[in-house]
Structure formats: C-alpha cells, structure tokens
Amino acid sequence: MSKIEALMQALDEKESQMGALENRNMELENVMQGKMVELENLEASRAKSLAKLSTIVSKFDELHNLSESPLAEIESLQSQLQERDSEVSFLHQEVTRCTNDVLGSQDTSKNYSSEMHKLLSLMKRWLYILEGLICKLVTRTKVAFVHT
C-alpha cells in the first residue's frame, strides 16, 4: 500500500502545485487586466496630447501668417523713414547753403535781404513739417512693431 500512498501523496502535491499555479495564473491575469486599463488610459492621453499639439501647431502657423503683414509694413515704414531722412538732410544742406549765400552777400539791398529771410522762414517751416511727419512715421513704426 505504500506505493499507492506514495502515488496519492504525489497526486496531492501535484494538485497543490496545480492550485498554486492556478492562483498565480489568476494573479497574472489580474495584473494583465490592470496593465490593459493603463494602456488604454495612456492611449487616450496620447490622443488628447496629439490633438492639443495639432491645435498649437495650427495656432503657431496662424500667428506666423499674421506676423508677415506687419513685418512687411514695418519694412515699408522704415524705407519711408529713410527717404524722409534723406529729404531732411537735403533740406538742411539747402538751408545751410542759402544761409551761407545770405551771409556772403551782406552788401545787397534791404529788399533782397527781406526776401531771403522769407525764403529761409519758409524753408524752416518745411523742415518743421517734415520733422513732424518723420516723428509720426517713427511713432507708427514703433506702434506697428509693438503690436507684432
């Protein structure tokens, strides 16, 4: 009977091992279910992140496109400012030349001196007007640049 008892004992051990393996299998299936839920959550989070990234890229592209127009306007204003600056420099030279001409011809008549004075006054007014225009242009350039 010892052989039968040995076989029975071996069978009991195998059943015990089988029960332990079934318990381990259940634990691993539970772990796997938890990992599947985590994977689904990560995939959902990834999809949300990709959607947000797509929105950010779209907004960036939109801002980039919107910034092109103000930049072109700023370049145009800078060009206009340089032109005005050249005009002012030319007028300063003309005023200087006219002033020198007036100083060089002090012997001329009183009437001629009066006419030159009027011309210089007119030129100075033109300079003030041009300087005002330049100031406005600079202000617009600064405002356009700040809003960019």
Image (tube, helix red, strand yellow):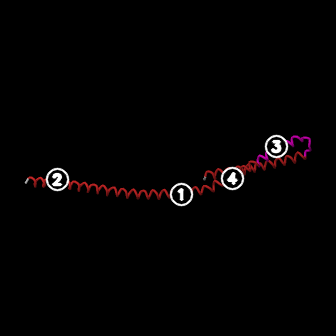
Q: Magenta span has 93?
A: yes
Q: Nearer the viewer, mark 3 or mark 4?
A: 4
Which SS class for mark 2?
helix
Amino acid type at image mark 4: Leu
Magenta span: 87-110
Circle on res. 96 = 3
Q: Residues within 10 Å of mark 1 (few under 14, many from 20)?
A: few
Circle on res. 77 = 4
Q: Residues within 10 Å of mark 4 (few under 14, many from 20)?
A: some
Label 2: which residue?
Answer: 13
Observer-nearest of 110 and 131:
131
Label 1: which residue?
Answer: 59
Instruction: Estimate the spatial distance between the alpha carbons at disc 3 and disc 1, rounded to whole Å.
Output: 55 Å
Q: Main secondary structure of the magenta part?
A: helix
Amino acid type at image mark 2: Glu
In the rendering, at what x and y percent does residue 2 appear? 8, 52
